[in-house]
Every structure is written in C-alpha cells, then in structure tokens.
Amino acid sequence: MKRLRRFIGAGLMTCLMLTGCGQSIDTENIQDVENGDSIEIGMSFDSFVIERWQKDRDVFVSTASALGASVNVQNASGDVDKQIEQIRYLIDRDVDCLVIIPIDSGALSEVVKEAKEKDIPIVSYDRLINQGDTDLYISFDNKSVGQMMARALIDAGATKVVKICGPTTDSNVAAVDEGFDDLVESANIQVLDTYHCDGWKAELGGAYVYDNIETIREADGIMCGNDDVAASVIRALAVSQLAGVIPVVGQDADLIACQHIVEGTQTMTVYKPVGKLAEQAAQLSVALAKGEKLDIDNTIYDGLNDVPYVAVEPIVVNRNNIDSVVIEGGYHAREDVYLNVGETQQDVENTELLPEE
C-alpha cells in the first residue's frame, strides 16, 4: 500500500507538471525516488555550497542503495522556509526515514514533530536539531575539532587570536567554539574579537579582514569556522601581504585548504572522514527505516531530550602529514594538492620532512 501511494503521488505530481498547475516542491532536487525499492529515505540538505556536502550525499546514496534503499535528496539552498517545505513534502511521501542537515538548528522542531507523529524516524546528520527529540545524531566530535584548531595556533606561538566563525544557527559552531575556547583560555591566549559569518557566507570572512585590518595586524593567529571561510580570509590577508605571516586554521580539508597548507598560507585544517560518516549514517538510517532498534550508548542533550549520539573522530592535517592523510587516503589527488607548488620545491620540502638517519 505504501508503494502504491507513492506511485499515485508520483502520477499526481506528473499531472501537475504537465498541466502547468504549479507546485511548491523543486523537482530538480529529487533523486532516486521511483526505482521500485521498498525502503525510501528522505535526505534534506541545507545546501551544496560547502564542498564536502556533495561527497556526503554521494557516499550516503551509494551505501543506502547497496542496502536496498532509495534516497530522495532535497537541497534547500540555504533557505530555512524551503527546507521546512521540502521536509513536509518528504513527510507526505511517507518516507521510511528522514535524514536532515539543518540550516537553522533551532527552526525545525515543529516540522520534526509532524514527522514523528507519522512514526517516521529522524536522523540529525552532522548538525543537531535542537529540541527535536530525533532518533539519532551522527556527526564528528566537534569539541575535539575546536581543540585541534586551538592546539595548532598554540604550537605556532599565538598569543592573540581572532575568531571568524560560522553562524550561530549552526549547533556545531557552539561545540567547536567551546573546545577552542577551553584550550586557548588555559594557555592564556587572548581572543581579540569573535565574528560570525551569517549563513556560512565565506566572503564575509574576507570582508571582516578588510574592515578590521588593525585588529588583524595585532593578532598572531586566526581561527576560521571552515576552510571556505579560511580561503576568503587568506585572500584578504594577501592584499596586506599578511598571507603566510599570520597563522590561519580551518576545518573540512577542502582542496583549496590543502593547497594553502603546502603553499604555506594555512597552518592546518581538520580532516573529517565524511565517507566514514556518510556510510555509517546510511547503515543506521536503513536500520531505523526497517524498525530496528539501534544499540548506541552515547547520548547528547538537544535542549529537551537525550538523543542517541554517534561521534566520528576527526584528524589534524598539517604540512607534516598531508600526504599520508589526504593524498594516500584518497581524499584529494596529489597533482591537485600540489597544483600551485613547483615539483622542485615539492621535492625539497618532502626531503626536509624526512627523519635524519
């Protein structure tokens, strides 16, 4: 009956499209919907602006497919109202499980309640839905990410830092900040200023540097919320000939960050094995879709409830281990990472990193 309802729903959608009646759902975002699988998982992304999300999507869809499930992928393009609308569409489809990467961690509790009223299990993916009482939260250890960023600046000799973070609507930002702040405070490092890039708009990070150049000149370390923001910051630093002078740290191991690391303009990034995260999330989502009980001991408080929590460990990436972690691990190709570094310089640097006999 469930599959019949989906077939009828698809037919009605087609009729609407052919007759020009209009509809509220962006059908360009629908993937792998009507392939006849008995399990359908709805996956709601905030956007694909951040480089890693496309990798998360591809691994998740591939893993779920291998387990006999189809995945209906929706992209809200950074619009909270659109994400709520798309989630309601997935609820109306009576999907077997909902996986959500929230744009605003505090804006989805009501629509999640609607899904739970229809007994649809909910997975908070990478970002926790506040007060959502979701069936699972799977992410990286974000407090540890902040500690890794702080440690890199401490090791670089920083005494005064500026924080150019992600938006406060992202629950992970607070966790990263907590880990970072705990460590820099214990090391008596002064935080000169904290700025939040609304909507993860990387260009705001560069604009902050331009508008606050005197504060930036006083700093000897810059913490960036992710590598996209770090790239914008580094471009702005280059204008004042400060790129490579002030240590910059980020997270996500984006290609441009890895290029900056070998070029010497970014001190470190945090590699988060998204393949492992997406694969495990797909496996657990299919289990929830089948009505299976998850055996998870750890929990995290969402503001009202303790939610089952799976935390994947991140990895520090710097000039010393970028080859072994990022390149040999297959995350980025060697020729891409070293694109802007001449072969001779690359060979010299690699030789310098070899231990003395």
Image: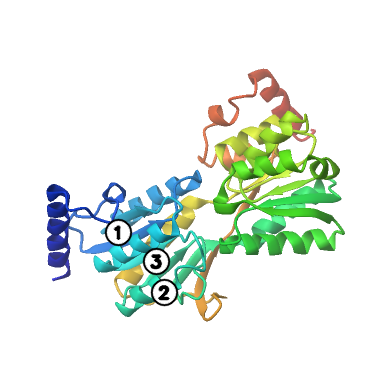
Tell which tag, 3 or 2, sits nearer the viewer. 2
Instruction: State which quadrant residue 168 falls in.
Output: bottom right
Instruction: Check the image and report above or below for 171 versus 198.
Output: below
Q: At 33% across and 57% down in the image, what residue appears? A: 64
Which dot marks residue 67? Answer: 1
Q: Quadrant of the N terminus?
A: bottom left
Tell which tag, 1 or 2, sits nearer the viewer. 2
- Which of the two labelled residues, at mark 3 and mark 2, occupies the earlier sequence position? 2
Q: Position of residue 194 (x, y in %)?
A: 73, 55
Q: Residues within 10 Å of mark 1 (few under 14, many from 20)?
A: some
Per the model, the C-alpha gap separating discs 3 and 2 is 24 Å
Disc 3 marks which amino acid?
A: Leu
Lateral position of residue 347 relative to residue 41, left or right: right
Name the residue that disc number 2 marks.
110
Q: Quadrant of the C terminus?
A: top right
The scheme the figure's colours follow is rainbow
- Which of the two labelled residues, at mark 1 and mark 2, occupies the earlier sequence position? 1
Which dot marks residue 284? Answer: 3
